[in-house]
Image (cartoon, rainbow, N blue to C red):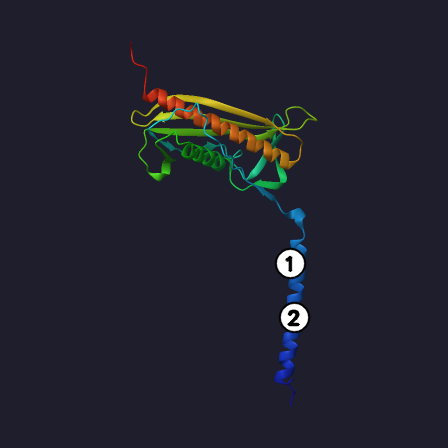
Amino acid sequence: MPTFPSRSRWLRWARASLMIVVCILLSACSVLGNNTRDRATVYDLDPRVQADPAWPKVDWQLSLAKVNATRVGDSLRIAVRPAANELQIYKGASWARIPTDMLEGAILRTLEDSGRIGAVARQRSGMSAKYRLMLELRRFESDYAAPGMSPTVVIEVSAKLLHIPSQSVVDSRTFLQQAPTATTSIEDVVQAFDQALHAVTGEIVGWVLASGNAANDPPRAG
């Protein structure tokens, strides 16, 4: 008759085999964990824009429509334009949020924190508002305009302020902000993006308050 190992011997053999498998797996994880070259560094822009004393105080409410953008420009990849007709991405780096979300969040927070407006909310919140801000993000990239030089970050936004009751556009404007980078490193490029987003957010918020205020209180005839 065939002989079988005892239960205790079989258990010892099973434990030893399991330990070998565990060691192999841990070793593989260690190798993967140390391979930082395959990891992407994630960056997020969160500018804090202080209210300008020149901004008017208004009592109407504003809804912020979802920001539109081209599919290529609205990506987690950080865009760079090495030549006029060429668009690439920075390797090993990405955004934590798509650019339209960063722009929308910066404008909403700046208006909320400014104390200059009755109320502001995203359009999908269902809040009843007098005006609606519609934005299109046209450019959100670093641009090597001059060969051999450090890039310049470019943010371009088209804005329209809509009077909701009449469905008429009371004002429109295109905002363009450029911020030069200190070097070609991705850290300096991201810093320039932060500066440009900070500047364009302040410009847009000031324009919204002034334009809505002028439309809401037109000059009276003398």
Q: Residue at x 63, y 83 (%)?
A: 8
Q: Residues within 10 Å of mark 2 (few under 14, many from 20)?
A: few
Up the image or down, 163 lies above or below 25; here it is above
Write down the residue under mark 2. 19
The single residue placed furthest to the top in the displayed view is 222
Q: Is residue 119 left or right of residue 83?
A: left
Question: What amino acid is found at the position of numbered circle 1 in the picture?
Answer: Cys
Q: Secondary structure at mark 2?
A: helix
Quarter-of-image position of residue 4:
bottom right
Picture quarter with the N terminus: bottom right
Up the image or down, 8 lies above or below 56; here it is below
Q: Secondary structure at mark 1?
A: helix
Mark 1 and mark 2: span between their CA atoms?
A: 15 Å
Q: Is residue 158 left or right of residue 18?
A: left
Measured as percent of width and height from the top left, residue 207 is found at: 43, 23
Q: Residue at x 65, y 70 (%)?
A: 19
- In the image shown, does 164 or 108 lie closer to the viewer? 108
| Mark 1 in CB contact with mark 2 (< 8 angstroms) | no
Picture quarter with the C terminus: top left
Write down the residue under mark 1. 29
Measured as percent of width and height from the top left, residue 25 is found at: 64, 63
